[in-house]
Structure formats: C-alpha cells, structure tokens
Amino acid sequence: MNSIPSYALYGEADSDREQDWLHWETIQSRSRLHDYRIAPHRHEQFLQILHLTGGSARLTVDGAAFALRPSSVVVVPALTVHGYVFSQDVEGIVVTLMERDVRDAGLGDLGAVVLRETAALSGALDRLIAEADRPGPGHGVAMRALIALLVVAIQRAGLDGAQAGAGSSERSVVHAQSFRWLVDSRFRQTRRIADYAAEIGISPTHLNRVSREVLGASALAVIERRVALEARRMLLFSTLSIKQIGAELGYEDPAYFARFMKRVLGTAPGAYRKRVLG
C-alpha cells in the first residue's frame, strides 16, 4: 500500500491547504501533461467523478480493468487505487469533491463504479459546476443541496448496471455488479462468500470465477478491499478508537482486526492515522 502514491490532484502532493467545495478541469488539460497515462494512485480525502464525452480510455480500479467510451461516468471514492490510459483525442471533465461533503449528504457511501451517463447525472454535474464557478447568496446551502442531488443521480444511474470489462460476458458483468452492490451494502454484516453467492443465485465457485473474470480479484479479496476501504475512511474521518472501528465492521476480536489492518496498510492502523492526519 505504501508504494501507491497519494495525491490531492494527480501529480500534486497532498497538502493541508484549505479546499473549496470542488475543483474541476478538463481531462485533456491534465492528461496531456503526463503523455495521457495516469499511473495508479489514490486520494486520501477526495472523491472524483470523471465524465468522458469524447475519445476513449482504459481504467484500472482496484485491479479491475474497464474500457471507457463516450458517455461513461466513473466514480472513484477516496482511498481507491485507480489509473487511466487516455486516447489523445479524449474529451470530458474530472470533478474532485471532498469525501466528507459527499458523506455529509447522508445518502450512504458511494463505491467505485463505472456508469452510463443519464440526463439527470450530467445535469446534476453541470448545475454543481455552475454554482461552484458563480457563487451567489446562499452558496453553502446550494452546494450541499446540489451535492446531494448528484449523489442521488449517481445512485439511480447505478441501478442500470456497470459497463463491462474487456472480454467479460454480459451475464458475468451483471453478476459481478450485483456482487459489488451487495458488498457495499452488507460488508459490515457478513464476509462469507456463500452468503453473497446465495443472494445472487449462483454457487460460491461461480461467484469466485465471475469476480476474477470481471473484477480482477477473488470474491474474498473484493470483500476485504471494501472492509479495508471503510476502515481507512473511519480512521481518517472519525474519532473512533481502533477497537471501536473493528466492532463497527463486525470484528469481535480487536487483535484480529489490528492484524488484518496491518496486512492491508503495511503498518499499524494507529500509525497510519497519525501519518496521514499528523
């Protein structure tokens, strides 16, 4: 984990400077500075939304690969490892938001997902950017409301399913997307592969095969990544103790949870929190 660079914006080290509500830029403006290759990295405190309107791209997120075409929308939560390779004719925008502002909307967490553009989703992005660029009276209230509307639009677009990775059958993609949505909603309650397979209506062996084919990792690895992501978020965005975080995530044995987090983080959870937050 320590080998993955962490940025505020790609190529710019994290800093303690005050952030506005959001930052946005064209995909072209930053990607051309890096020869259209954005190496795998993560953002400690930021959620990003990429809206591809022209050209093409290849996305890697937590080891899974996706081919992006115009009308793709990518949601990447804080602490999620992701990278891109863009075509030189790429068009679109990247919007960067504070993770805490999205969580404060009170509509649940957003997982990493590739969506198809909807009118509601593109409209929500446009309105949010317009308000950020031209603030007026009641700006804070407007931004909170528009962020909430954007989250709703993302969640509704997600009901239509994710795009397929290269070479994946449509049925496999549907199963994999169902698995990711179930993990997002139930990872606190169960880490048993059999429970998720039963919900989807396939065998645990089939679920493992689908997970490796579409998501690039075993079903257990997908579940553990989601647990680890939430644990990192709680370490950074809450004042709960390590023991309390473990209990929230379903670990009755604090020592076992601490060992799990050390394996994931490469360091003890308390040391990770101190290093990032100072």
Image: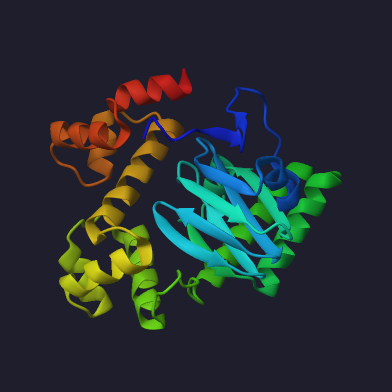
Indicate left or right for 127 with 278 as reference.
right
Q: Nearer the viewer, residue 40 or 175?
A: 40
Image quadrant holding the N terminus, namely: top left
User: Which residue sits at x=36%, y=62%?
Assistant: 215
Q: Position of residue 105 (x, y in %)?
A: 57, 51
Q: Nearer the viewer, residue 142 or 9?
A: 9
User: Which residue sits at x=30%, y=56%?
Assistant: 222
> Is any part of residue 24 visible from this angle?
yes
Is 202 above or below relative to 183?
A: below
Q: Nearer the viewer, residue 134 or 93?
A: 93
Q: Position of residue 50 (x, y in %)?
A: 63, 56
Name of the residue lying farthest toward the top: 278
> Is any part of residue 109 visible from this angle?
no
User: Which residue sits at x=32%, y=33%?
Assistant: 265
Q: How is the image coloured?
A: rainbow
State the image quarter where residue 136 is shown: top right
Indicate left or right for 222 with 127 as reference.
left
Q: Position of residue 224 (x, y in %)?
A: 27, 49
User: Which residue sits at x=49%, y=74%?
Assistant: 159
Is 87 above or below relative to 135?
A: below
Is 114 above or below relative to 263?
A: below
Indicate left or right for 264 with 88 as reference.
left
Indicate left or right for 157 with 243 as reference.
right
Q: Position of residue 273 (x, y in %)?
A: 38, 25
